[in-house]
Image (cartoon, helix red, strand yellow):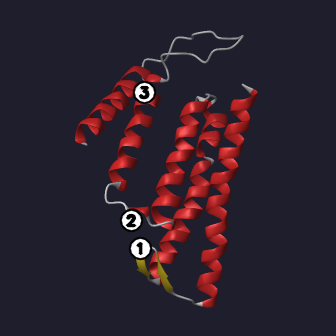
Amino acid sequence: MKQKNRLGRILYFWVNLSFLVPIVYLILRMIFGRTGSSEAGYHSDSDYLLMLMQCILGLVTIHLPSILERRLRFELPGLLYGFYIVFLYCAIFLGEVRSFYYLFPRWDSILHFFSSLMTGFFGHGGDHPQPGPACVHEPQPPVCVPVRLLLFRHHRLSLGDL
């Protein structure tokens, strides 16, 4: 358990750093007005502004699960949170900053597949309580069943769409 928390903290730190470094770089690039090309070709100022906004929103979005956990008093499984962080890294940093959307023709389909897997895991997450000394399976409110079925159905439709 201690090793998993350590790995999660390293992953969290790495993804936050991979959002912060491009933010600083893009702000400096916009201040000094240098345009140029990347691996995918020429980027305009609006492309750099889009990258900047995505990195800033990625920093906000990566903290959303912990904010919701505190407000709604639930615990997101560590594996699902790890998938969420990896998805943000792949979509924002690799996809937009490193231009994977342009370099790999099926990058968007890979992200959609990964997203449907996360949705399916989230839909099944309520079935199994977290193991531990205080592992008590509490009854769920009636609204949880339709929500979980909707998430599972979305997961199945997304897999069939590939």
Label 1 sits on a secondary structure element that is: loop
Q: Residues within 10 Å of mark 2 (few under 14, many from 20)?
A: few
Give the label on residue 120, or none.
Answer: none
Q: Which quarter shows the C terminus?
A: top left
- Check whether the beta carbons of the residues at disc 2 and disc 1 lie within 8 A of each other: yes
Q: CA distance from mark 3 to mark 2?
A: 33 Å
32, above or below 72, in the image:
below
- Residue contact between numbered discs 3 and 2, judged by CB atoms under 8 Å: no
Seen in the picture, residue 20 relative to 27 is either above or below; the reply is above
Which of the 4 image quadrants contains residue 29?
Answer: bottom right
Observer-nearest of 90 and 61: 90
Q: Secondary structure at mark 3?
A: helix
Q: CA distance from mark 2 to mark 1?
A: 6 Å
Q: Can you identify the residue that label 1 sits on?
A: 40
Residue drawn at the location 67% of the way across and 52% of the way down: 14
- Is 128 left or right of 110, judged from the image as shown? right
Q: CA distance from mark 1 to mark 3?
A: 37 Å
Instruction: In the rendered structure, find residue 123 and report the number of the disc placed on it.
Output: 3
* Residue neighbourhood size for the residue with mark 3, other residues' Cα within 10 Å, grouped as few (<14), some (14–19), many (≥20): many
What amino acid is labelled 1 in the image? Ala
Mark 2 and mark 1 lie on one chain; the one further toward the N terminus is: 1
Q: Amino acid at mark 3?
A: Gly
What residue appears at the point 63 percent right and 35 percent down from the top-left corner? 69
Tags 1 and 3 touching, CB below 8 Å: no
Helix, strand or loop status at disc 2: helix
Query: Residue at label 2?
Result: 103
Quarter of the picture containing the N terminus is top right
Query: Residue 127: x, y in percent?
Result: 48, 16
Residue at (56%, 89%) from the top-left corner? 34
